[in-house]
Amino acid sequence: MRDVVIIGYGQTKFGELWESSFRDIIVEAGVKAIEDANIDGKDLDAIYVGNMSGGLFIGQEHISSLIADYAGLTPLPCTRVEAACASGSLALRSAYLSVASGHHEVVLVGGVEKMTDVVDATSAIATAADQEWEAFFGATFPSLYAMMARRYMYQYGLTLEELSMWSVIAHDHGYRNPYAQFRFRTTLEQVMKAPPVAEPLTLMHCSPVSDGAAALIVCDAERAKEFVPKEEMIYIRASTQASDTISLHSRESITTLKAAKVASEKAYKMAGITPDKIDVAEVHDCFAINGLILLEDLGFCKKGEAGKVVAQEKIRIECEDFVTVNPSGGLKAAGHALGATGIRQVGEIYWQLKGDKNCKDRQAVIKHGYGITANVGGSGGTVCIHVLSNNRNR
Amino acid sequence: MVVRSWRHIKERYCLIGTRCKTCGRIFFPSRNICPYCRRRGELEDYKLSGRGKVYSYSVVHVPPKELEMIAPYVIAIVELEEGPRITTQIDCKPEEVYIGMPVEVVFRRIKEDGEEGIIHYGYKFKPVENQ
Ligand SMILES: [Zn+2]
């Protein structure tokens, strides 16, 4: 397997982008990534795109052809990858494997979702759950995570205050991110007293409906020297994935994501590190409870302790004795444009490890040079993990 | 959608799942392969009692379009006596439900299909009386 590096990243703002179309936003992100990597369209060997549901949200399938077409990149092979909210990182993993294997050298990886054109987003999002045995009976997507939260509270004594602190910190981080959907601060009281969505979760425990696109350029490490200086390359040290049952009720435990545990353990092994070497993480907080559960499943704290860690505000950018979590604001504040999220998470870590000017107002302390992303599909049926390194401490 | 609904009558109306003769595990909804025994597994129909306890729950305030009429409603994962867990509505007031609440199956109208006007039936659970 060859070393694979990221040499460029670009994204649109996430949010309600009423003036832009699906085509507009993915092309904007792709062009920014290509410019950032200092490559030309003719250097590319392939395109991979993560997208959950062009069919339901904009009535358009076959978006692989559409994107190659409107990016002016035909006849490059373009492949669309789908795994609900984990579509983006699965597209990156496909690109990574194609470069690591030696088949491709320079690949454009995008993620895109245009969610605000549709009327009943709740029903469209619910297709990430089991349609016949969850959604049919009235389970909405937030209610599945709400049932995880309720059970977690019952088993580990998590309080609503502890859970709500997640959202307060997310907004403090997102406030400093110009690309974030929500750039305002919030308080514990505002989070807890927001309108209920699925009890015990309020609107302020839930990530928003978003439009957005993000794109990365991944490249063979040798070939990359042609485009950027070595200190601007960020290495992909692990790319792993695991699956679990599509329905939440079929799992032995609903207070852990087994697929996240399995995939992250593999990722640490592949990268040759332990969780304490991670400086910065972007985790999939589609709902606040998932942020807490992922802190445990990624090995940053023990089972049942995440509530205390969050209440003590250890995940903040300013806190130096714990991993910085979601400096971008996470899905909660930066926005959750389903298929784009996995790419946006990796893009944030790429910026953080590089010390890029794009994250100057929210730069985490980088001691060991490692970052991790955890991207979750559905209620945990797919989890994809990437470990990145700036390779300066090896 | 009509065919898809009709195909599930046995399960949704009669709560029939499957049992693996090899390892004794019971599954609901039914499966064609036992994930534990795979090719060594042998599956047969198995009628569930319809009694169980609330394993976790939520009260849905933002429903899909076709359930707007009944919101807020209680959604839960119920652990059946025989072991399997299922997702279902609980026919009770939001303030009544709790983890561990004994419940039993009832058959109810679940929703109406907007375009075709088809009424879908299936199970809900209700609190066991005289507890
Ligand atoms: Zn078996």
Image (cartoon, grey):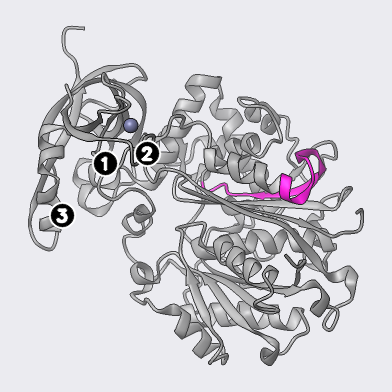
> In the rendered structure, the residue with mark 3 lies on which chain?
B
| Amino acid at circle 2 | Pro
Looking at the image, do the residues carrying marks 1 and 2 touch, with CB atoms under 8 Å apart? yes
Between the C-alphas of marks 3 and 1, the distance is 16 Å
- Residue labelled with disc 2: B35
| Amino acid at circle 1 | Arg
Mark 3 and mark 2, same subunit?
yes
Above or below, A363 against A107 in this view is: above
Between the C-alphas of marks 3 and 2, the distance is 24 Å
- In reply to whether residue A280 is colored magenta, the answer given is yes
Which residue does the image show at 73% across and 83% down from the upper left?
A35
Answer whether residue A391 is visible to the viewer in this image.
Answer: yes
- Residue labelled with disc 1: B31
Q: Nearer the viewer, mark 3 or mark 2?
A: 2
Q: Which quadrant of the frame does ligand 1 lie within?
A: top left
Based on the displayed image, in which of its 4 quarters is residue A34 positioned? bottom right
Q: Is mark 2 within 8 Å of ligand 1?
A: yes
Residue A183 placed where, x, y %?
64, 57
| Amino acid at circle 3 | Arg
Of pointers 3 and 2, the one earlier in the residue sequence = 3
Q: Most extreme residue toward the top, as rendered?
A: B131
Q: Is mark 1 within 8 Å of ligand 1?
A: no
Give the class, few, some or many, for how many residues have Cα within 10 Å of label 3's Cα (few <14, many ≥20).
Answer: few
Q: Please provide the residue range marked out in magenta.
A: A269-286
Give the class, few, some or many, for how many residues have Cα within 10 Å of label 2's Cα (few <14, many ≥20).
Answer: few
Between the C-alphas of marks 1 and 2, the distance is 9 Å
- Residue labelled with disc 3: B4
